[in-house]
Image: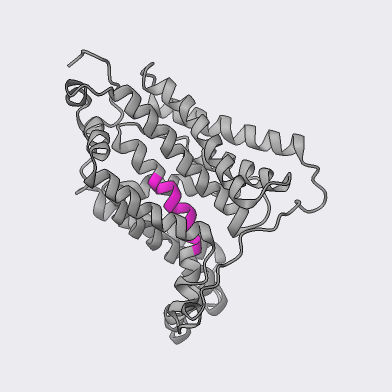
C-alpha cells in the first residue's frame, strides 16, 4: 500500500503521463474541432493509424522527423477531406462514413506498409525524436524530469491546446466555427459558407488526429506495427464529451486518462496476486465512470450530426 502511494510522488510517473497523453491531446483537439463545426468524425482510429504509418514510413525512406510529421498531417487532411465530402455536401450518415473511413484507412495503412517495407523477424526501426535538454531547467528537482525532458511533439501538442482555445473563443474564425456547429443558417445569413467551414474543420481536425498517430511511431516508439493505436481514437471521442467541447478541459481529460494508464503499469510491479488484465482494464473503466459523471451536464453543439442544406430551415 505504501509503495503504491509512493508512486504518486515519482517524477518518472508524471513524465510518463505527459508522454502517454500527447497522442491523446492531438486526437482530442482534432475531434473537438470537427464536432465544434457540427461533424462527428468516427474515422479517427483509422486516421491515427494512417498517420502513424505514413509518418514513420516517410522517415524510414530518408526524410527528417519533422517532414514525417508534416506528411502525416497532410495524409490525415486528405482522408478527412473524403469524410467531409461524404457527410457535408452529400449529407450521408456521419456514423457510417466515419466507421467506413476507419476500416478503409486502417486497411490501407497496413497494405502500404506490407507493400513497401520488407519485414523480417522484427519490424524495422528509425531514429525517433529525443527528449529535449533545457539547461538548468532540466536539472530542477521533480519539475525538470517531468516538464523539461519531453520530446518536441509533446510541447507542440501543449501549444496547440492554447492556440485552439484562443482561436475558438477570441477570434471571428472561432465564432464562425462555433456557430456552424450550433446554427449554420445563422452563419449563412452573415454571408459565410457553412459547407466550406465544415469541410475545412474536418480536414484540419483530421490532420491533428494524424499527428497523434505520427507521435506514436516517431517519438513514443521507433517502428510501426498493426494495432499500435489500441483504441486511442475512441478514447479521444469520449474525452471530448468529458471536456464539454472545451480545449482546456480536453487537455485535463487526456492527462487524467494518461495518469490512469501510467499508474496501472507501475502498480503491476508492486501489487502481487492480481491478474494483470484488471490493471489494463482500469484506465478505461475509470474513464467511463468519469464520463458518466460529467456527460449529463455537457452542452452538445446543437447542429452536431445534422446535415446542412442551403436555404432550408
x, y percent for residue 272? 55, 77
> Total of numbered circles in the picture?
0
- Which x, y percent locates residue 204? 42, 37
Q: Nearer the viewer, residue 275 or 5?
A: 5
Q: Can the viewer see residue 278 in this picture?
A: no
Residue 7 part of the magenta-drawn span: no
Q: Residue at x 25, y 33 (%)?
A: 181
Residue furthest to the front? 135
Give the residue displayed 29% in from the left and 38% down from the top. 36
Q: Residue at x 45, y 81 (%)?
A: 142
Q: To which quarter of the image does residue 61 belong?
A: top right
Q: Answer with the quarter of the image where residue 286 lies.
A: bottom left
Q: Which residues are magenta?
A: 19-29
> Picture coordinates of residue 34 (x, y %)?
36, 36
Q: Is residue 239 left or right of residue 299?
A: right
The image shows residue 111, relative to residue 232, as above or below, that is above
Vertical order, 32 against 161 (above or below): above
Name the one closer to the observer, 186 or 303.
186
Residue 5 visible in the shown view:
yes
x and y, in percent, of residue 105 in the image: 57, 33
SS assignment for the magenta stretch, majority: helix
Amino acid at each position: 500500500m505504501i509503495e503504491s502511494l509512493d508512486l504518486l510522488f515519482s517524477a518518472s510517473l508524471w513524465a510518463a503521463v505527459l508522454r502517454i497523453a500527447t497522442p491523446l491531446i492531438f486526437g482530442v483537439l482534432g475531434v473537438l474541432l470537427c464536432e465544434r463545426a457540427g461533424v462527428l468524425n468516427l474515422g479517427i482510429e483509422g486516421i491515427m493509424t494512417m498517420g502513424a504509418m505514413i509518418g514513420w514510413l516517410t522517415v524510414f525512406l530518408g526524410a527528417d522527423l519533422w517532414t514525417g510529421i508534416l506528411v502525416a498531417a497532410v495524409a490525415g487532411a486528405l482522408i478527412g477531406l473524403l469524410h467531409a465530402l461524404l457527410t457535408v455536401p452529400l449529407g450521408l450518415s456521419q456514423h457510417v462514413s466515419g466507421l467506413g473511413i476507419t476500416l478503409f484507412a486502417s486497411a490501407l495503412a497496413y497494405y502500404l506498409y506490407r507493400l513497401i517495407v520488407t519485414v523480417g523477424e522484427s519490424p524495422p526501426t528509425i531514429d525517433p525524436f529525443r527528449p529535449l535538454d533545457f539547461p538548468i531547467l532540466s536539472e530542477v528537482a521533480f519539475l525538470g524530469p517531468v516538464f523539461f525532458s519531453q520530446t518536441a511533439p509533446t510541447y507542440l501538442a501543449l501549444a496547440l491546446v492554447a492556440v485552439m482555445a484562443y482561436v475558438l473563443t477570441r477570434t471571428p474564425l472561432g465564432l464562425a466555427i462555433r456557430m456552424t456547429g450550433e446554427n449554420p443558417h445563422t452563419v449563412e445569413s452573415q454571408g459565410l459558407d457553412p459547407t466550406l467551414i465544415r469541410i475545412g474543420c474536418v480536414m484540419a481536425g483530421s490532420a491533428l488526429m494524424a499527428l497523434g498517430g505520427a507521435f506514436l511511431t516517431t517519438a513514443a516508439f521507433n517502428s510501426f506495427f498493426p494495432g499500435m493505436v489500441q483504441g486511442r481514437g475512441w478514447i479521444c471521442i469520449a474525452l471530448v464529451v468529458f471536456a464539454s467541447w472545451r480545449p482546456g478541459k480536453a487537455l485535463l481529460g487526456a492527462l487524467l486518462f494518461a495518469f490512469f494508464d501510467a499508474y496501472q503499469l507501475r502498480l503491476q510491479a508492486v501489487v502481487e496476486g492480481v491478474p494483470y488484465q484488471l490493471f489494463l482494464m482500469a484506465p478505461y473503466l475509470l474513464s467511463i465512470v468519469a464520463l458518466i459523471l460529467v456527460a449529463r451536464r455537457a452542452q452538445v453543439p446543437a447542429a452536431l450530426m445534422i446535415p446542412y442544406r442551403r436555404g432550408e430551415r
